[in-house]
Amino acid sequence: MQQLFENNLDAKNLSILQSLTSPAKIQAYLDSIPYVGEDLNRTPLSVMQDRQCHCLDGGILAALALNRIGFPARILDLVPEPGLDDDHVLAIFQVNGKYGAVAKSNFVGLRYREPLYRGLRELAMSYFEVFWNLERIKTLRGYTRPLNLKVYDKYNWQISQTGTDRIVARLYSMKMIPVINQAEIANLELTDERSFQAGMLGTDLNGVFKPGQTH
């Protein structure tokens, strides 16, 4: 399936893909293309052709690129309080048994994680303090188990919109594993103004979730 994807790339994009030889380089590539807030979930092929993405299709592309350099193609979803924020997709990888992540985000703090985390909960919690909305509410509530994209190879998810849509449907149907209870939620403080401003550096407000909007 990897070869099928590469056969569909033009020479420039094939060269870019071949240059992504580490998780950090994959992250740098995602950071180099614009974040676009839209409902369309592009295939990895479309992301590279259009040179834009959001966290979900960027995460799927990152999983493909990680798979190319020897990691399983796996994603998980960070799940917010419903109605308060967007979810956030991570492409995860392991080095010496510890988890790291590559992610496309409109916010400074929701991107790369070094492979230092002993478990998925520990990795997810590394995003907690920087997972907030425009009202400065800390909104992370849980995460899903990893979704192995190899299961969807028969649908050609790397180049097929139908394949990508199947991945998205499955991801959004997965049960959330909570990281915080109701009593803890009630006692959360708002993100301080200085951290909020720092986290908004370079953010495209057109792509930011507005509390109360449907998604």
Image (tube, helix red, strand yellow):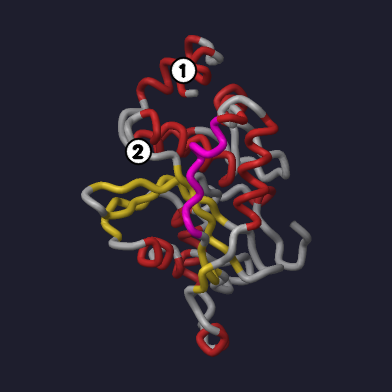
Q: Which residues are magenta?
A: 145-153
Q: Which mark is residue 71?
A: 2
Q: Position of residue 6 (x, y in %)?
A: 48, 17
User: Would residue 173 appear left or right of 23 to someone viewing this image?
Assistant: right
N-term-proximal mark, 2 vs 1: 1
Q: Position of residue 179 (x, y in %)?
A: 47, 74
Residue visible at 64% across and 41% down? 36
Of 165 and 36, nearer the camera is 165
Q: Position of residue 185 (x, y in %)?
A: 55, 83
Q: CA distance from mark 2 to mark 1?
A: 16 Å
Q: Is residue 201 magenta?
A: no
The quarter of the displayed image where residue 123 is located: bottom left
Q: Is residue 154 above or below residue 183?
A: above
Instruction: Find numbered disc 2 in the image and state the secondary structure of the residue it sits on.
Output: loop
Three-letter amino acid code of the residue under disc 1: Gln
The residue indicated by pointer 1 is 3
User: Would residue 43 appear left or right of 61 to someone viewing this image?
Assistant: right
Q: Is residue 70 above or below residue 202?
A: above
Three-letter amino acid code of the residue under disc 2: Phe
Instruction: Find numbered disc 1 in the image and state the secondary structure of the residue it sits on.
Output: helix
Q: Which mark is residue 20?
A: none
- The C terminus: image quadrant: bottom right
Residue visible at 25% across and 47% down? 95
Q: Position of residue 148 (x, y in %)?
A: 48, 44
Residue visible at 40% across and 48% down? 92
Of 5 and 88, nearer the camera is 5
Residue visible at 61% across and 47% down? 204
